[in-house]
Image: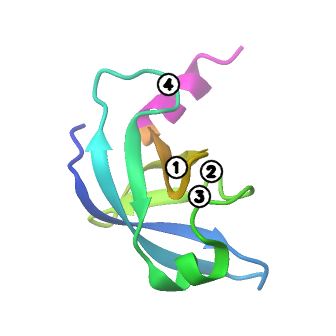
Amino acid sequence: MKWWNGKAKIYCTLGENKVEEFEIEIVRVLYGSTGNKNMVVNITDEKLLDKTGGIVQGMSGSPIVQNDKLVGAITHVFYNDPTQGYGVFAENMIEDIKNMK
């Protein structure tokens, strides 16, 4: 499936014991990439930036949704810029599950 750069959302829990929706942008899609670094995301949601400064420990696995479709999950933060990080394609997660023994 082909995904595009652009607006998306992540869903995570930040200590209030409820799932919240936050705006992000997929800034680069790395189609030839395997593993868990398939897209670069940028946190654009001011509420999330005010609360955390960006991607923090514990956000790995937060679903990434674009155009009402699950496209992947957060995997890594850029150490030099916590407002950006990597995401993995949902397809790669499914393939990994299929290949588990």
Q: CA distance from mark 2 to mark 4?
A: 16 Å
Q: Which mark is residue 73?
A: 1
Residue at the image position 47 percent from the left and 44 percent from the top: 87
Q: Which quadrant would residue 33 be assigned to in this image?
A: top left
Q: Position of residue 98 (x, y in %)?
A: 56, 22
Question: Which secondary structure, mark 3?
Answer: loop
Instruction: Tell which circle, 4 or 1, labels the residue nearer the N-terminal end.
Output: 1
Amino acid type for the residue under numbered disc 2: Gly
Instruction: Tell me if residue 3 comes above or below residue 95 in the rendering.
Output: below
Q: Position of residue 60 (x, y in %)?
A: 65, 51
Residue at the image position 56 percent from the left and 78 percent from the top: 48
Q: CA distance from mark 2 to mark 1?
A: 5 Å
Nearer mark to the viewer, of 2 and 4: 2
Camera-side residue: 42 or 70?
42
Q: Are marks 3 and 2 in contact (CB under 8 Å)?
A: yes
Q: Which quadrant would residue 25 be assigned to in this image?
A: bottom left
Q: Position of residue 83 (x, y in %)?
A: 50, 61
Instruction: Tell which circle, 2 or 1, labels the residue nearer the N-terminal end.
Output: 2
Q: Would you name the residue on which mark 2 appears?
A: 61
Q: Would you name the residue on which mark 4 appears?
A: 95
Residue at the image position 48 percent from the left and 43 percent from the top: 86
Question: Which secondary structure, mark 2?
Answer: loop
* Secondary structure character of the magenta stretch overall: helix
User: Which segment is the magenta one?
Assistant: 91-101
Q: Residues within 10 Å of mark 1 (few under 14, many from 20)?
A: many
Instruction: Tell which circle, 3 or 1, labels the residue nearer the N-terminal end.
Output: 3
- Give yes or no for residue 71 being in the magenta stretch: no
